[in-house]
Structure formats: structure tokens, C-alpha cells
Amino acid sequence: MTGKNGMRVIAIDGPAGSGKSTVARALAERLGFDYLDTGALYRAVALKLVRAGLNEGAGDDVISSVLRGTSIEFKNAAVYLDGEDVSVEIRTPEAGHFSSIFSARRPVRDYLLDIQRNAALSGSIVAEGRDMATVVFPDAWRKFYITADERTRAHRRFAQLREKNTDITQAEALSDVSTRDTRDAARAIAPLAKADDAIEIDTTDLAIEETIQRIMAAL
Ligand code: DC
């Protein structure tokens, strides 16, 4: 189904380190679609809340009041928090941790819902995250669930962070991926889940190009 105004949405969900961001970005480029990294939005929200001095004990009302005066935008593969490009700062393991914590909260999910849906109003998009096919774009044109076994995902995350000179061990990367996935899948609101009508692709033994080809073949 095409979305509002005839725009097409390709929804891609999956756990941390599954390769979905790399695949979604490349797919968008090949198809001439916009790319929407919703994890980046959750990371930017978490950064704002942490900067405001909040932690996981914060009440919904406090979270809502901080977010009321906040602007978050994703454009040209960069994320802006109140006009500041925070694309680098949101990639630390600490930002990943807090994004997983705060993304379980209702005011955070409500705040980002319109921002995500509005991204599909001006053009066709490849949107990736945890609840693209289940909650944000239930009528998406195509839906995919990208996964890989936990060790592979942890290794990919480790390699990615080391490339950015982040001080992290293999064991820490494994613990980060596994803790975050358990929390993201167990939360009450919009948990990480495969939509019934999504095509599942296990990328454990697939190169990025092979994954892209499988998706292209299913369009
Ligand atoms: O994709 P990522 O690792 O950058 O996402 C960071 C966190 O944001 C992830 O642990 C869970 C949350 N998230 C979410 O709850 N829903 C989304 N659609 C995308 C991310």
C-alpha cells in the first residue's frame, strides 16, 4: 500500500547490530528514497533528557515538560537537537544505554510519533527502527525484519565503535547489545517485534550487499 499522498514507506525493524542501518541507508540511496534513522531520534531525545539532569527515575510529567520545548529533526542523515548537530555525540555507548531506557517511556514515544510520520509526508522513505512496521507505519508499502545471531551483532557493534576510537571491549559490546535488546523487546509500549506481515532476513551469514539484494528482490 502506498502511504498518504502516494508516498511509499519501506519499514525495517530489528535488534541492535543487525545491520539494518547500513542496509536501510544503502537501500534509500539506490531507490532515491529519503532515509529515516529513528534510533537517532531516540538517541537525541535521551541526550536532551540527560543534559536536563534526568535519569531513569524521572516521572512522566518531568519528561513531558522537558520535551515540550524541544526540537528534534533528522535531515541529510544528521540529527539536530534544538538546532545543534548531535550526530556524533549520540553514538556513544552511554547514549545508546539512555536511549534504550528512555525509549520505553510513553511521553518519549508520543513525542516522536508525529516527527516520524511527518517524515513520510514529503517523499518516499526507508524508515528503520524497532516499531516501524508495527506501530509507526502499520500500512507501510513493504516491511522487513532484519536480524542476526547475538554474537554476530555484538561483534559488528564492537567493530563499529572501535572504528570511531571508542574504548570498548568485545565483552562490553556483547553485554550492551544483549541488555538493550532484552529491554527493547520486553517493554510494554511498542516493543521490538516482527510484524506478522514483515519478511524476516537473518543476516548472520550474509554480506551487506546480499542483504540489500534480497530486499530489492522482494520489492
Ligand atoms: O537503532 P539504535 O541502536 O540507534 O536505537 C537506540 C535505541 O532507541 C534502542 O535501544 C531502542 C530505541 N528505539 C526505539 O525504541 N524505537 C525505535 N523505532 C528506534 C529505536
Image (spheres, helix red, strand yellow):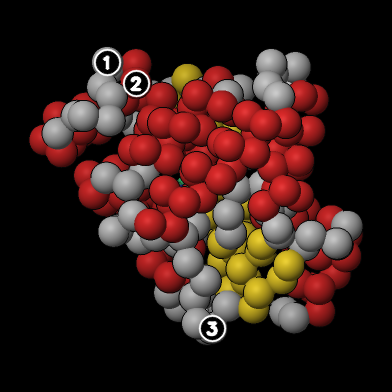
The image quadrant that residue 93 belongs to is top right
The spot of residue 156 in percent (x, y) is 76, 42
Tell me the kind of residue under disc 1.
Gly
Residue 102 in view (yes/no):
yes
Residue contact at pointers 2 and 3, CB within 8 angstroms:
no
User: Which residue is at a point 34% across and 21% down the rendered structure image?
Assistant: 50
User: Which residue is at a point 30% across and 58% down the rendered structure image?
Assistant: 189
Residue where numbered disc 1 is placed: 53
Q: Is residue 154 left or right of residue 79?
A: right
Residue where numbered disc 2 is placed: 50
Question: In the figure, 178 relative to 57: above or below?
Answer: below
Quick one: label 1 or label 3, which is nearer the N terminus?
1
Question: In the figure, 207 relative to 84: above or below?
Answer: below
Residue where numbered disc 3 is placed: 197
Residue contact at pointers 2 and 1, CB within 8 angstroms:
yes
Q: Is residue 149 left or right of residue 183?
A: right
The spot of residue 200 in percent (x, y) is 66, 74
Tell me the kind of residue under disc 3.
Asp
